[in-house]
Amino acid sequence: MSHGPTPKSWISAIHAYVPGKSAGADGRPLIKLSANENPLGTSALALAARASAAEPSRYPDPDSKDLRAAIGAVHGIDPARIVMGTGSDELLNLAAQGYAGVGDEVLFPRFSFSVYDIAARRCGAEPVVAPDADYGSDVDALLALVSDRTRVVFVANPNNPTGSFLPKGEIARLHAGLPSDVLLVVDQAYAEYLSPEDDDGALALAEAHDNVLVTRTFSKIYGLAGERIGWGTGTSGIIDTLNRIRGPFNISNSGQAMALAAVNDRAFVESARVHNATERARFVAALEALGNHGLRPLPSEANFVLILFTGKLTAEMAYNGLMERGYITRWLPGQALPHGLRITIGTAQQMDDIAAALREMAEAAR
Ligand SMILES: *Cc1c(COP(=O)(O)O)cnc(C)c1O
């Protein structure tokens, strides 16, 4: 009797990441507001830089030297303290793999990024989920679950899928409460959407302490999700660890060229931030003006809003109704949020359309 190779038990236990959809069940293309991509697209300077990328027959610079120098200059970080990843996804996985394994625990809040569970299980560690505080991350709940076996703590700030934000004092309190041999990963995928005064202080912690990794991405405000580029910063020990285990040529030629131009196009980043803040506020105000239909938009500091549905109109009905009107959003029953619909902030026209559609559906369901 023949039998194939057996995957490790902890790999079989992984529920594969479910990406935001881009088409309906009938294959019809839909306007995609399900993956928090930039509705303004990509910086024109970044698009132009694609043409000047090193030729594809050649391997890329394994150290992404010019790109790290540009990121360092923009953020005031020594490029030696920056590590690049094939998306921040690679770095989140490497952080777990570098510091945790079988018998260890990886801790993160309930209703946070689904990659943390996968990253924990990939290296054989046990995911430990801390209760939320009204859907936000709860520092006390996280600290209460730290054990002798905790090796890595993940928090996304702002958080996905809730949009919630832990201010500087809370991040400092979380860090101060952790043993110095526990790695704190602050995933700042949406940090560029914050107002400048809302810095959560994690970059400063990552410079001053040996147990903090901050990750960022080019997938969101920079509009380069398709190029797969992320970066992280910490002290030299962490950077050295991640460099040992990352893919040696993990950022493509086109990716390095485009991200370098994108990080230097501060005007594009600022216009995208302002667009998002304006349209998010307008969208939330439109939802609040609906009155008592049981739609609750959670406060968001990111480029999406999670709406909780507690009335006659359910999240599933809203998801399907928006799909009929040409929009794909993110319904989250697989993340224990069957009452939640996450909608990426799109153009002004799209947000007006969606708010009007939700009003129509809520009134019809009454
Ligand atoms: C989108 C997202 C990322 C980015 O992942 P990439 O691999 O860089 O595309 C990371 N963390 C969170 C919380 C996200 O929502």
Image (cartoon, rainbow, N blue to C red):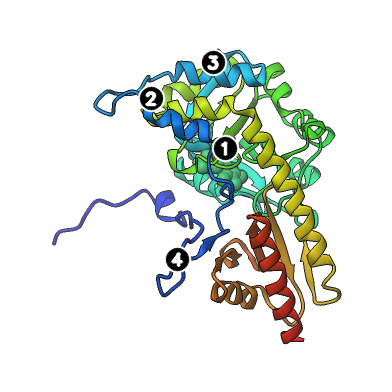
| Circles 2 and 3 in contact, beta carbons < 8 Å | no
| First in residue order: circle 2 vs circle 3 | 2
Are the two marked residues, 1 and 2, in contact with CB atoms closer than 8 angstroms? no
Q: What residue does disc 4 label? A: 29
At 43% across and 70% down in the image, what residue appears?
Answer: 28
Measuring from the top left, give residue 288's x and y in whole percent: 83, 66
First in residue order: circle 4 vs circle 3: 4
Residue underneath mark 3: 69
Identify the residue position indicated by label 1 in the image.
Answer: 222
Q: Earlier in the sequence, mark 1 or mark 3?
A: 3
Relative to 137, residue 65 above or below: above
Spatial distance from mark 4 to mark 2, Cα to Cα? 32 Å
- In this view, the residue in front, 348 or 26, is 348
| Left or right: 68 in relation to 187 | left
Residue 100 percent location from the top left of the image:
53, 34
Kindly identify the amino acid type of the residue bearing the numbered disc 2: Ser
For mark 4, give the secondary structure.
Answer: loop
For marks 1 and 4 on the same chain, the one whose residue lies earlier in the sequence = 4
Closer to the camera: disc 4 or disc 2? 2
In the displayed structure, would residue 271 be above or below residue 69?
A: below
Q: Which residue is mark 2?
A: 52
Alpha carbons under labels 1 and 4: distance apart: 24 Å
User: Residue 219's spot in the image, x, y percent?
Assistant: 53, 41
Q: Earlier in the sequence, mark 1 or mark 2?
A: 2
Front one among 174 and 365: 365
